Image (spheres, helix red, strand yellow):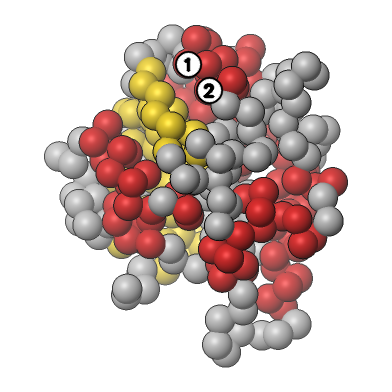
Amino acid sequence: MSEPETLTVEVNGFPTRIWRKGNGPKIGFLAGFGGLPRWVPFLEELAKSRTVIVPSLPGFPGGDRGHTVLDSHLDWLLAVRDILDQAGLAGADLAGSSVGASLAAEVAALWPATVRKLALIAPFGLFDEKNPPTDPWAQRGDAVPGLMCADPEIWKALKSPPEGANSIEWPIEQVRANEAAARIFWPLGNTRIEKRLRLIKAPTLLLWGEADKVMPRAYAEVFAKGISGDTTTRIIAGAGHLAELDKPAEVAREMLGFLGTA
């Protein structure tokens, strides 16, 4: 698996990494909880038939300390819109997972002309006190891998330092990513996104891991009913919250089948 091309743009005075690989129509992907410190098999599958563009979120791996100047949810959404524009994704298909899926949905709601089709993997943003999501920030560190993936070893491998990585900076970057996500979704991951779902006009694919231990599967129905555009929901067998990590080929196949390859 070859490495993607790496570009850098500036957002609010901080550098932000943009990965790019593949050929064909563009698809943007916003990563889930913890971000992406390395290129993963799911992205490689998409890149077989699409130009895959993966902007880092501020504070996530590749996003430096850009989260430190974002004080409100609106600040975050404007920063994400800026990143997507600079990445050349205006008008393209947009996908996201977990926390990234929530931001992708918000962009599609507030700037509908910028998103052709939308694919969301277990997005954050909802909160039902009778069926609450699991708060990943309130867990012991050794419990997080089993929350994120059905196979905890996949998460551990994603977060393990690559050969040659700075042994001091690497863990700092991973903790910073969790802090950045907490700043977006404090408290309890509740952004009241249900109030804005009706503004989403783009055809939308909702993907949920069958074994998701973070976001209740019932939330998929809330998203599907709230979005104005046509929605399709698929459950991914054997996958946890970050279904694209557990089942990269299956998730990519569902996504490409929905979005199309041409």
Where 87 sits versus 235, above or below?
A: below
Instruction: Return the x and y of residue 155 as percentages of the image width and height.
Output: 59, 62
Would you name the residue on which mark 1 appears? 224
Would you name the residue on which mark 2 appears? 220
Instruction: Return the x and y of residue 75 as percentages of the image width and height.
Output: 69, 36
Q: Do the residues labelled 1 and 2 touch (CB within 8 Å)?
A: yes
Q: Residue at x 56, y 70 (%)?
A: 157
Instruction: State whether residue 28 appears in this view.
Output: yes
Q: In which quarter of the view is residue 14 placed? A: bottom right
Q: Which of 151 and 15 is in front in this view?
A: 151
Instruction: Return the x and y of residue 224 as percentages of the image width and height.
Output: 47, 16
Disc ID at residue 31 = none
Q: Which of 133 and 36 is in front in this view?
A: 133
Left or right? Give the position of 214 relative to 103: right
Name the secondary structure under disc 1.
helix
Left or right? Give the position of 255 relative to 173: left
Q: What residue type is labelled 1?
A: Ala
Instruction: Return the x and y of residue 158 as percentages of the image width and height.
Output: 56, 67
Q: Residue at x 15, y 39 (%)?
A: 262
Left or right? Give the position of 218 relative to 114: right
Q: Which amino acid does label 2 sit on?
A: Ala
